Image (cartoon, rainbow, N blue to C red):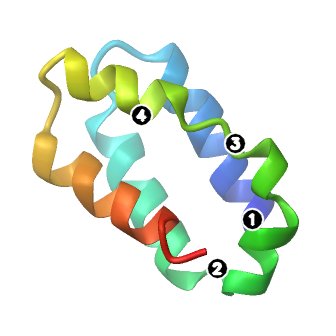
């Protein structure tokens, strides 16, 4: 499951308007156990998510994802 989250994070960073990918990422993050995310923490590159905040993408979607990631 954590691998799927990593793949979606990479996909989000490549797309111009990744709304569907952000929703999928949110769904995946809600189902991944925290221990699994902690194991992959070094590989979770969050820079692209913060870049989207600056580009005025769906703020609500991004904030939900960031809050899920802050659990660990």
- Distance of label 3 from label 1 (alpha carbons): 9 Å
- Distance of label 2 from label 4 (alpha carbons): 18 Å
Q: Secondary structure at mark 2?
A: loop
Q: Which residue is mark 4?
A: 49
Rendered image: mark on residue 7: 3
Badge 1: how crowded within 10 Å, few (<14), some, or many (20+)? Answer: many
Residue ID at (48%, 67%): 70
Q: Which residue is mark 2?
A: 32
| Residue 61 position in % (x across, y down) | 21, 52
Q: Quadrant of the N terminus?
A: bottom right
Q: Which residue is mark 1?
A: 2
| Earlier residue among tags 2 and 1 | 1
| Residue 6 position in % (x across, y down) | 70, 47
| Earlier residue among tags 3 and 4 | 3
Foreground mark, 3 or 4, reads 4
Residue ID at (53%, 70%): 29
């Amino acid at each position: 499951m954590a691998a799927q989250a990593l793949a979606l994070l990479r996909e989000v960073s490549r797309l111009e308007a990744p709304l569907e990918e952000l929703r999928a990422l949110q769904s995946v993050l809600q189902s991944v156990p925290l221990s699994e995310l902690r194991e992959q923490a070094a590989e979770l590159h969050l820079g692209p998510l913060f870049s989207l905040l600056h580009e005025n993408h769906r703020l609500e979607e991004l904030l939900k994802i960031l809050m899920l990631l802050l659990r660990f």
